[in-house]
Image (tube, rainbow, N blue to C red):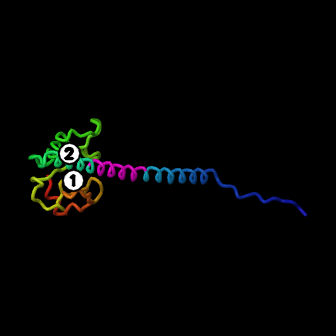
Amino acid sequence: MTDEVKKPAEMSGKVFILLVALGAGVRGLARFGFRTAWRGDSRKAECRARLIALSIAAQEYHGKYHAWPAATGPAFWDAIVRGTESRVPKKIDLLHCPVTGRPYRGPSSSPDGRDPAAFIGCCEPGVHGPELLGLTQKWEFVEAKPDDPRFAATK
């Protein structure tokens, strides 16, 4: 009997390098793809947190003055934050979207007498995906399509 050990088939150097490069490419694609998706979700969550903080400031403002500021659009939120002397640290910018840097849209008219389901504020459409992030007058956070009629109630 012979104790011959069969040798495994040898792989050429070019095929080996090709497989290593392919594996590295797939790993890199997965890493950066997940990172990009996570970054988008984290920005959306940050935007949502800022809108929620603005809604809390607006409730404090209305509770303090029993009225809404006369300003409309982005100036509405500026008046809310200044009027409540918000306890948010100055380094946190509540008034601007973390993705675009543009101010949040505010109501186009005084919130008094409006439909409570109408948007009182929102981010620009298309920034965080196909939906826009909106805040209703009932202080509910909504993801809506840009053609939602409630979006027209903001400027």
Against 85, is 67 above or below? below
Q: Image point 50% across, 54% down: which residue?
A: 26
Q: Image point 16% across, 50% down: which residue?
A: 106
Query: In the image, what residue type sits under mark 2?
Result: Pro
Instruction: Inspect the magenta stretch and tell me whether residue 107 lies in it.
Output: no
Question: Circle 1 is placed at which residue position?
Answer: 122
Query: In the image, what residue type sits under mark 1?
Result: Cys
Earlier in the chain: of badge 2 and badge 1, it is 2
Which residue is farthest top? 90
Viewer-side residue, 46 vs 69: 69
Q: Secondary structure at mark 2?
A: loop
Using residue 91 as the reference point, say whether residue 107 is left or right of it. left
Question: Circle 2 is placed at which residue position?
Answer: 103
Using residue 31 as the reference point, say whether residue 100 is left or right of it. left
As measured in the structure, the alpha-carbon distance from the residue carrying label 2 to the one carrying label 1 is: 9 Å
- Is the magenta region chiefly helix, strand or loop? helix
Q: Secondary structure at mark 1?
A: strand
- Location of residue 36 in the rendering, given as x and y in whole percent from the top left corner: 39, 50
- Location of residue 79 in the rendering, given as x and y in whole percent from the top left corner: 15, 42
Instruction: Inspect the magenta stretch and tell me whether residue 44 lies in it.
Output: yes
Against 78, is 33 above or below? below
Which residue is farthest right? 1
Task: Give the magenta-colored segment's residue range.
Answer: 35-50
- Location of residue 101 in the rendering, given as x and y in whole percent from the top left corner: 25, 43
Question: What crowding class fits label 1: few (fewer than 14 Cα within 10 Å), some (14-19), or many (20 or more)?
Answer: many
Question: What crowding class fits label 2: few (fewer than 14 Cα within 10 Å), some (14-19), or many (20 or more)?
Answer: many
Using residue 48 as the reference point, say whether residue 35 is left or right of it. right
Quarter where residue 111 is shown:
bottom left
Q: Which mark is residue 154?
A: none
